[in-house]
Image: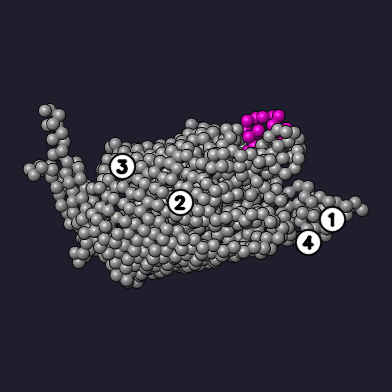
C-alpha cells in the first residue's frame, strides 16, 4: 500500500507541457524544433504544429522554438504542482515571426538530415567545436563522435591527419563545405592539412554514418561530413585566439565581423597561423589560412560570397616507425640492411634513433608544400513560407609539390641518357625531385525545398568539372650530365566531369509515422592522358552511371521515443590510383556497391538521453589491398565479391546536476571479407605466392570503439575529462595476430575559466593536457610482406602518437 501511495505521489508530481507552434498568421508550422534549454529534451512539432513534453518535474523551464525562415522564440514557462485534475498540464501557444532578414538556413535545411530523417547522425554546434579547438586538425575535433578513430602522422594532431568512421577511411566519405564538395575528385580523399584551422570558421558540422542522405560530390561509403560556415552575426565582433604548448606548438587566430550594416550587408574575416615541430622527428608544420565572406540581404534573398584559402609546408613523416625499431629488435634492424630494405646509412640512422620518434627521412628539405584557394558564391531565395531555393557556384585551385631526396637512382628510370665522367659511364645518381599537382575544380549546385502540411520535398543536383596536371621535376642531381634545371621527366592530366541529381522527400502518413524516400542519379566521365612517374603510358577513359535509391520510416511514439528503419544503396567509382596501378592488360577495377540497412531507437528526457543504432553494410566488389602488385611493384587494390560491416552504436547522456553532465558512445562491430586470397612477394623464385584464407577481418576496423566525456561546470570554471578506447585492429586484411595495432585507451583533461567584463564580451583561459596518463600507443600502420629463404618477413611502419603534452591559451571576444 505504501508503494502504491509513493508511486501515486511521484506521478502527481509530474507535469505535462503541451502547445502549438504557428506562424504570424496562425498557420501551423510542422517540423518546428522545440527544445527545453539546459536539458537533453527536444522534439519536432507535428503536422498541425502541436507538441507536448510529458513527465516533467515542476519548476521553471526555458522553451526555445525555431523554424526555417523565422526568428527563434524563447519563453520561460513555470510548471506548477497543481494536481487537482490528475497529472497537471500547461499549454502554451508559440507564434513565430518571419525573419526580417532572410538567412542561409534553407541551404543547411536542404543538405542535412533532420530530426525525423531515418539515418544515424551527430550534430556538432559551433560552440562545441570552438570548445574543442586547440589548433588540432578537424579529425581530432570529431574524435569524440560515435565510431570515429583519428590518427596523426606527426603524432600530435597537427599536419597530416585523418580519421575513419566504422573503419571506413576518408577516401570513402563525402565531405562538403556549405554543400560544396571538398573531396579531391581523383583520389576521393580530403586533405584537411590544406585548410588549416577551418573549424574556426565553422558554425556547425553534421556527420551522417552509413550511406546517409543524397548530396553532392563523392559517394558516401561510410560517412558524410557536412560543414557549414555561412551564418549571419547581427552585431559587430572581434575575436583573438592565442595558444602555445608542447613541441613548440603555437596557434594564433584573429576573427572579425561587421555585424549587419544598414540592414542589408555583413562581412566576416579570419586569419590563422599554426606552427609545430611535431612529436615525430622532423615532422614540423607551418600552416596558414584565411577566410573571407560578404553577404547582401535584400528582402527574402541572401547573396553571399565566400573565399577561404590554406597554405601548408609540412615535413614528411609518412613512413612511420618500423616495428623492429619500436620493439628495440636489434637483429630485426640489421635485417633491414641485409635484405636491402634500407641502405647501410639508413639502417645505422634507425638504430641510433629514438624508438618512438624515429623518422626515415633526413634530407633537410623533405617537405610537402601546397596551397589551395576556394571560392564560393551562394544565392538563396524564399519564394513563399513553404518554398525555398538556393544555387551555388564554386571554383577551387590547388597547386603544390612534395620534395624528395632519392639515392642511387637509375638514369634510365627517368628517361635520361647515361652520362660519362672522366670517360666512365655513370648509370646511377643521387637526385632531388619534386612531384607536382596543379588542379582546378569548378561547378555549381542547386536545391529547391517545399514543405507544407504533412510533407516536404527537395529537388537538387550539381555539375562539377575537375582538371589536374600531375608532373615531376628533377631539381638537383649528383652527376648532372647535361640535365637542365627543373627537368621534367613525366606529365599526365586527369579530367573528370560529374553530374548528379536527386529528389528527396518525406510524408507523415499517420500521426507519428513519417515515410522517407530519396533517389539519386549520378553520371561521370573520367579521362587520364600522359605518362606516369615510371614512364608508363596512362591514356584511358572511363564512364559510369549510378542509380542510388534510399527509403525509410520514422515513428515517433510520444515526445520521448523515436524509432526508425532505413535501407540505402549507393555506388562508388574507382579512384585515380586504382586505375593507374592496374598493370597493362590487367583487369580494370570495377565500381563498388554498398547496401546499407539501419535501424534505431532514440529516447530523450530532461535529465538523460539514450540511443541505439543497428547497422549492416554489405558490399559488392569492395576494393581492398590483397598484397597483389603490378608490373612495377606497386600495390594494387582488388575487388572482393563479398564483404560487410555490421554493428551496434550506443549513445547516452546523463545530466546528474545542473553543473555535472556525462555523455558517451560505444560501437561494437564485426567487419568481414568473405573468401579472401592473400598475395605475398616471393623473393626466392620471383613472382608471388597466393594463400586462400577464407573469411577474414577488414583492416583498420576495431571491434570496439568507445568515448566518454565528463563535464563539470561550477560557475565560471569548466572541466572536461575526455576518454577514448579503441580495440584491436588488423593492419592488413589477413586477420593475422602478428600484424595488429594493439588496443589503447587515452584520456585528455581540459580546464577553462571564463569571465565577462566591460572591456571584453568574453575572456576564456584554457588549458588542455592530452594523453593525461602518458599512454604509449600507435594509431595507424602499413605493412609489406615477402618470402626469402623459404621464410616470411615483413617491412612495416607504425605511427606512434605523442605521450603527455600540453596546450594553453586565451580566447578574447570583443
Describe the element under mark 3 as helix, strand or loop: strand
Cα distance, mark 2 to mark 1?
55 Å
Disc with the residue nearer the chain's start (3 vs 4): 4
For image coordinates 69% across by 39% down, the residue present is 786
Residue corresponding to mark 2: 595
* Residue occupied by mark 4: 484
Front residue of 787/42: it is 787
Task: Give the class, few, some or many, for how many residues have Cα within 10 Å of label 2's Cα (few <14, many ≥20).
Answer: many
Q: Residue furthest top?
A: 2
Q: Contact (CB < 8 A) between labels 3 and 4?
A: no
Q: Which residue is mark 3?
A: 609
Which residue is at 49% across, 41% downward? 671
The numbered disc on residue 418 is 1
Q: Please identify the dominant SS of the magenta region.
A: helix
C-alpha gap between disc 4 and disc 2: 54 Å
Quadrant holding the C terminus? bottom left
Q: Are marks 3 and 1 in contact (CB under 8 Å)?
A: no
Which mark lies nearer to you, 3 or 2?
A: 2
Between disc 3 and disc 1, whose residue precedes?
Answer: 1
Q: Position of residue 82 (x, y in %)?
A: 10, 43
Disc 4 and disc 2 in contact, CB within 8 angstroms: no
Residue 322 shown in magenta = yes
Q: Which residues are magenta?
A: 320-337
Q: CA distance from mark 1 to mark 4?
A: 14 Å
In the rendered image, residue 674, in percent from the top left (x then y), is placed at 53, 42
Rendered residue at 32%/59% (across/down): 506
Amino acid at each position: 500500500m505504501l508503494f502504491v501511495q509513493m508511486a501515486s505521489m511521484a506521478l502527481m508530481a509530474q507535469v505535462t507541457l503541451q502547445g502549438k507552434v504557428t506562424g504570424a498568421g496562425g498557420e501551423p508550422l510542422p517540423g518546428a524544433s522545440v527544445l527545453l534549454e539546459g536539458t537533453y529534451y527536444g522534439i519536432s512539432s507535428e503536422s498541425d504544429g502541436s507538441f507536448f513534453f510529458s513527465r516533467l518535474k515542476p519548476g521553471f523551464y526555458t522553451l526555445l522554438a525555431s523554424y526555417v525562415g523565422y526568428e527563434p522564440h524563447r519563453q520561460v514557462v513555470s510548471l506548477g504542482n497543481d494536481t487537482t485534475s490528475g497529472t497537471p498540464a500547461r499549454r502554451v501557444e508559440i507564434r513565430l515571426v518571419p525573419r526580417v532578414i532572410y538567412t542561409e538556413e534553407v541551404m543547411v535545411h536542404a543538405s542535412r538530415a533532420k530530426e525525423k530523417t531515418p539515418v544515424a547522425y551527430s550534430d556538432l554546434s559551433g560552440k562545441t567545436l570552438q570548445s574543442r579547438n586547440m589548433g588540432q586538425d578537424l579529425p581530432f575535433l570529431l574524435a569524440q563522435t560515435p565510431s570515429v578513430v583519428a590518427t596523426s602522422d606527426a603524432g600530435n594532431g597537427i599536419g597530416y591527419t585523418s580519421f575513419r568512421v566504422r573503419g571506413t577511411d576518408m577516401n570513402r566519405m563525402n565531405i562538403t563545405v556549405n554543400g560544396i564538395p571538398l573531396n579531391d575528385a581523383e583520389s576521393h580523399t580530403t586533405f584537411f592539412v590544406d585548410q588549416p584551422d577551418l573549424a574556426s570558421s565553422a558554425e556547425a558540422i553534421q556527420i551522417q554514418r552509413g550511406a546517409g542522405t543524397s548530396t553532392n560530390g563523392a559517394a558516401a561509403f561510410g560517412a558524410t561530413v557536412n560543414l557549414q560556415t555561412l551564418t549571419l552575426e547581427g552585431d559587430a565582433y572581434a575575436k583573438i585566439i592565442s595558444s602555445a604548448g608542447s613541441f613548440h606548438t603555437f596557434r594564433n587566430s584573429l576573427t572579425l565581423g561587421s555585424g549587419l550594416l544598414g540592414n542589408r550587408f555583413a562581412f566576416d574575416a579570419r586569419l590563422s597561423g599554426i606552427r609545430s615541430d611535431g612529436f615525430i622527428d622532423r615532422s614540423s608544420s607551418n600552416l596558414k589560412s584565411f577566410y573571407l565572406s560578404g553577404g547582401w540581404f535584400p528582402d527574402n534573398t541572401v547573396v553571399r560570397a565566400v573565399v577561404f584559402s590554406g597554405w601548408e609546408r609540412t615535413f614528411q613523416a609518412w613512413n612511420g616507425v618500423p616495428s623492429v625499431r619500436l620493439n628495440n629488435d636489434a637483429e630485426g634492424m640489421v635485417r633491414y640492411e641485409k635484405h636491402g630494405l634500407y641502405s647501410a646509412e639508413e639502417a645505422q640512422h634507425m638504430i641510433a634513433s629514438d624508438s618512438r620518434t624515429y623518422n626515415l627521412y633526413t634530407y633537410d628539405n623533405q617537405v610537402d608544400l601546397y596551397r589551395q584557394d576556394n571560392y564560393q558564391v551562394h544565392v538563396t531565395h524564399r519564394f513563399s513560407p513553404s518554398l525555398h531555393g538556393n544555387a551555388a557556384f564554386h571554383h577551387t585551385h590547388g597547386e603544390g609539390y612534395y620534395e624528395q631526396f632519392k639515392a642511387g637512382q637509375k638514369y634510365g628510370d627517368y628517361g635520361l641518357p647515361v652520362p660519362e665522367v672522366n670517360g666512365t659511364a655513370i648509370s646511377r645518381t643521387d637526385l632531388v625531385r619534386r612531384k607536382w599537382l596543379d588542379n582546378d575544380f569548378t561547378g555549381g549546385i542547386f536545391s529547391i525545398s517545399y514543405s507544407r502540411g504533412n510533407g516536404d520535398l527537395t529537388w537538387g543536383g550539381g555539375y562539377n568539372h575537375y582538371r589536374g596536371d600531375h608532373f615531376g621535376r628533377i631539381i638537383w642531381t649528383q652527376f648532372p650530365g647535361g640535365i637542365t634545371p627543373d627537368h621534367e621527366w613525366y606529365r599526365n592530366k586527369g579530367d573528370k566531369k560529374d553530374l548528379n541529381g536527386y529528389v528527396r522527400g518525406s510524408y507523415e502518413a499517420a500521426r507519428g509515422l513519417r515515410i522517407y524516400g530519396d533517389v539519386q542519379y549520378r553520371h561521370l566521365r573520367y579521362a587520364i592522358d600522359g605518362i606516369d612517374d615510371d614512364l608508363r603510358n596512362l591514356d584511358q577513359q572511363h564512364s559510369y552511371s549510378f542509380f542510388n535509391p534510399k527509403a525509410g520510416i520514422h515513428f515517433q511514439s510520444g515526445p520521448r521515443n523515436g524509432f526508425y528503419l532505413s535501407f540505402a544503396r549507393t555506388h562508388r567509382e574507382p579512384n585515380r590510383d586504382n586505375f593507374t596501378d592496374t598493370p597493362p592488360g590487367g583487369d580494370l577495377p570495377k565500381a563498388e556497391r554498398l547496401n546499407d540497412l539501419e535501424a534505431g531507437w532514440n529516447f530523450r528526457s530532461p535529465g538523460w538521453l539514450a540511443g541505439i543504432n543497428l547497422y549492416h553494410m554489405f558490399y559488392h566488389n569492395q576494393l581492398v589491398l590483397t598484397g597483389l602488385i603490378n608490373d612495377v611493384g606497386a600495390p594494387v587494390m582488388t575487388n572482393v565479391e563479398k564483404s560487410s560491416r555490421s554493428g551496434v552504436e550506443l549513445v547516452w547522456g546523463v545530466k546528474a546536476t545542473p553543473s555535472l553532465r556525462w555523455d558517451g558512445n560505444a560501437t561494437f562491430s564485426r567487419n568481414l571479407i568473405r573468401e579472401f586470397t592473400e598475395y605475398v612477394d616471393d623473393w626466392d623464385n620471383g613472382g608471388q605466392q597466393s594463400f586462400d584464407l577464407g573469411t577474414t577481418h577488414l583492416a583498420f576496423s576495431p571491434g570496439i570503439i568507445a568515448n566518454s566525456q565528463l563535464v563539470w561546470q561550477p560557475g565560471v570554471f569548466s572541466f572536461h575529462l575526455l576518454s577514448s578506447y579503441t580495440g584491436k585492429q588488423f593492419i592488413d586484411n589477413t586477420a593475422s595476430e602478428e600484424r595488429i595495432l594493439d588496443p589503447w585507451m587515452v584520456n585528455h583533461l581540459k580546464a577553462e575559466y571564463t569571465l565577462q567584463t566591460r572591456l571584453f564580451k568574453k575572456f576564456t583561459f584554457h588549458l588542455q593536457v592530452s594523453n593525461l596518463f602518458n599512454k604509449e600507443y600507435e594509431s595507424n600502420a602499413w605493412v609489406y610482406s615477402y618470402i626469402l629463404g623459404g621464410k616470411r618477413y615483413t617491412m612495416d611502419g607504425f605511427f606512434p602518437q605523442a605521450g603527455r603534452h600540453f596546450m594553453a591559451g586565451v580566447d578574447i571576444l570583443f
